[in-house]
Amino acid sequence: MAEKRRYTVSLPDHVADRIESYATKVSATPTEYAADILRWWFGQGCPPVTPDELQLRKRELAKRILPVPPDLNVWHLDKEKLYQIDDDNVVKKLLGQLGVPNLFAHAAEHDQTRLLIAFDNHPTHWLVIDLFKGSDRKDGDGLLFRAYPKMDTSRKQMLDRLAEEGKEMETNREIKFSQIPAHIKTGIPAS
């Protein structure tokens, strides 16, 4: 077995007391219990633990986003790539390929609407579509298409992400996956 790295950390008394309390309950040393916490964090996909780290990761994510190819087909996304597209014309084209209707059709000119729709039945990606109308966003009204590769993002991670976005939207309902309409002309590959 490979040599394990060791870290020395200083904890406030109230945190150390809590770790010691739980460690005793599971017949472990405080060091072993703290290591269990770190392994759990790693198993959760190493989520950011501070607001600064969250912002840093968002900036890193933005750097990985590539320009949109003109012939992009929603059914032939690169299974390893993350997509984030905010060009309304491109997003409308992708919605058409998915067979999703105009989601703003019911909104009057003066309405303020924010919708978030997530699809889980795409073959390679978790799809998330944001719609903003009458919003206070700096770029105003618009559409945002995101596709997260399933090979890099677990269902649990995606549900956690949706829950977090629901909190940001201040919705009182859980955001759940919808199903892409199964129309023959959408180009859905046969399963």
Image: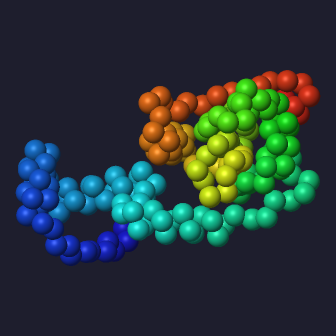
| Colouring scheme applied when the structure was drawn | rainbow
Residue 95 image position (x, y, % from top left): 80, 38
- Left or right for 7, reference 154: left
Position of residue 119 relative to residue 32, above or below, is above
User: Which of the two residues, 109 or 95, is positioned nearer the viewer here?
Assistant: 109
Residue 45 image position (x, y, % from top left): 46, 54
Q: Is residue 93 visible from the viewing direction of this image? A: yes
User: Which of the two residues, 119 or 106, is positioned nearer the viewer here?
Assistant: 106
Count of numbered circles on the image: 0
Position of residue 7 relative to residue 173, above or below, is below
Residue 107 image position (x, y, % from top left): 70, 30
User: Which of the two residues, 126 or 44, is positioned nearer the viewer here?
Assistant: 126
Residue 125 image position (x, y, % from top left): 69, 44
Q: Is residue 126 visible from the viewing direction of this image? A: no
- The quadrant of the picture occupied by the N terminus is bottom left
User: Which of the two residues, 31 or 180, is positioned nearer the viewer here?
Assistant: 180
> Which residue appears at 80% of the width and 24% of the height?
182
Position of residue 31 relative to residue 121, above or below, is below
- Left or right for 133, reference 33: right
- Left or right for 92, reference 130: right
> Which residue appears at 20% of the width and 73% of the height?
9
Residue 7, quarter of the rendered image? bottom left
> Which residue appears at 16% of the width and 72% of the height?
10
- The quadrant of the picture occupied by the C terminus is top right
> Which residue appears at 60% of the width and 64% of the height?
61
